[in-house]
Image (cartoon, helix red, strand yellow):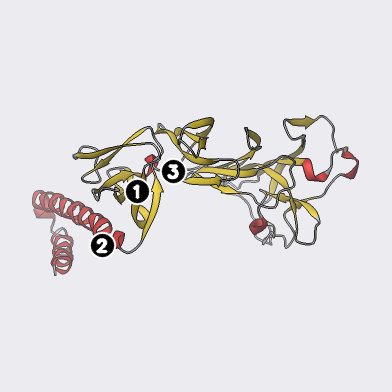
Amino acid sequence: MKLSLFFHFSIFLFLFSCNNNQTKSIVSDNTFAEDSVKKLRDSLQMSEFTDKALLEKSERYTFSDSCYIYSQPDTNSLAIAKLPVLTRLTIFGNRPNLSKGIEWYKVETKDKRIGFIDVQDLVFGEFENKQKGYKLVAGVREKIQLGSGIVAINRINLKDNKVIETLRLPLISMPSVTEISSTTLISASKVLRYTTNSEECPGLTENYFIIDTGTRLILLAKGSSSGESSWYESSTVFIPKKLGNGKVMLVVDGSFENIFNLETGRLNVFPYPKDIGVPIENLIVIENKDIQYELDKNDDPIENEDGTYKIASKNYSTEYYSWDGEVIKKINKKY
């Protein structure tokens, strides 16, 4: 009923605004309408926390050394709890909701206190190795300010939850970390792909590939892609993976999910240079592209008949790296 009345009131304002003699009244009414829209939006936003959030539950851990649970999705509201690192929380809902520029989860503590937590205070990736007595957890170390922050991947001792080792990585926004399975890299307890990206123009995605030897976290390679209408740059990483038939291939991002290129109809794999002197099982390849497109008089890219853009210039290069179980080394040869 409230929505219906608000809708009809908005239509009335629109019709009333056609009368040029009522300018002052229109400005006043439009201001009232904008305030009403804001209140309505805020109320609908809060309903996300009170209604949909109750549909699904999951468990997450806190990541920061001390994080706060608030009575409302607002850092100016009452802080009802201060929690140490790796405190288990029940999460309501399968996604956070935005309020006052911060993404929040509705949560419940072990002692049944219910409130709201900044999503950046939670672990976003966890990988356990019970056999060796540790787990890897990923979270935001320094929250995003002025477009950047810091993510940390910590090695945690399972006995006392103490941090044994930390690897810090840049954060743009929307961090995620996944395990790369079936890799053939020697001494790899796990290989992880950490991704962070920005949707602001020009778009940017960065992929960091990390190997866990069981005692050390080592950055293997970094890939990225960025571009807009007039240009495109990318550094694509190929990781060795073993197929079900035993064959090893250099697969883009180490992901079988992206192995098929829908645009070209070809496999997203890099051909192994057999004379490189490094077994394919321990070879990492980075393919770099720098492309400039032809523009028309309106500075829009010119399309070919097949829908692709005409290329004004391009520069391709390839880097090769070998992994010996302890160190990643660049191969100073061209193929």
N-terminal of the pair, mark 1 or mark 2, is 2
For label 3, the residue is 123
Q: Secondary structure at mark 3?
A: loop
Residue 90: x and y in percent read 34, 52
- Foreground mark, 2 or 3, reads 3
Residue 262: x and y in percent read 67, 62
Could you say which quadrant of the image residue 191 lies in? top right
N-terminal of the pair, mark 2 or mark 3, is 2
Could you say which quadrant of the image residue 223 lies in? top right
Tell me the CA gap for discs 2 and 3.
24 Å
Q: Is residue 87 above or below residue 108?
A: above
Q: Residues within 10 Å of mark 3 (few under 14, many from 20)?
A: many
> Which residue occupies the foreground of this view, 293 or 19?
293
**Residue drawn at the location 75% of the way across and 60% of the way down:** 266
Type of amino acid at the residue the image marks with label 1 = Leu
Q: Which mark is residue 51?
A: 2
> Which residue occupies the foreground of this view, 149 or 62?
62
Q: Secondary structure at mark 2?
A: loop
Q: Which mark is residue 230?
A: none
Type of amino acid at the residue the image marks with label 3 = Val
For label 1, the residue is 89
**Residue drawn at the location 24% of the way across and 58% of the way down:** 50
Q: Residues within 10 Å of mark 1 (few under 14, many from 20)?
A: many
In the image, taking residue 235 as reference, residue 66 lies left or right, namely left
* Labels 3 and 1 touching (C-beta < 8 A): no
Residue 37: x and y in percent read 20, 55
**Residue drawn at the location 88% of the way across and 37% of the way down:** 277
Type of amino acid at the residue the image marks with label 2 = Asp
Q: Residues within 10 Å of mark 2 (few under 14, many from 20)?
A: few
**Residue drawn at the location 86% of the way across and 44% of the way down:** 273
Q: Is residue 159 above or below residue 265?
A: above
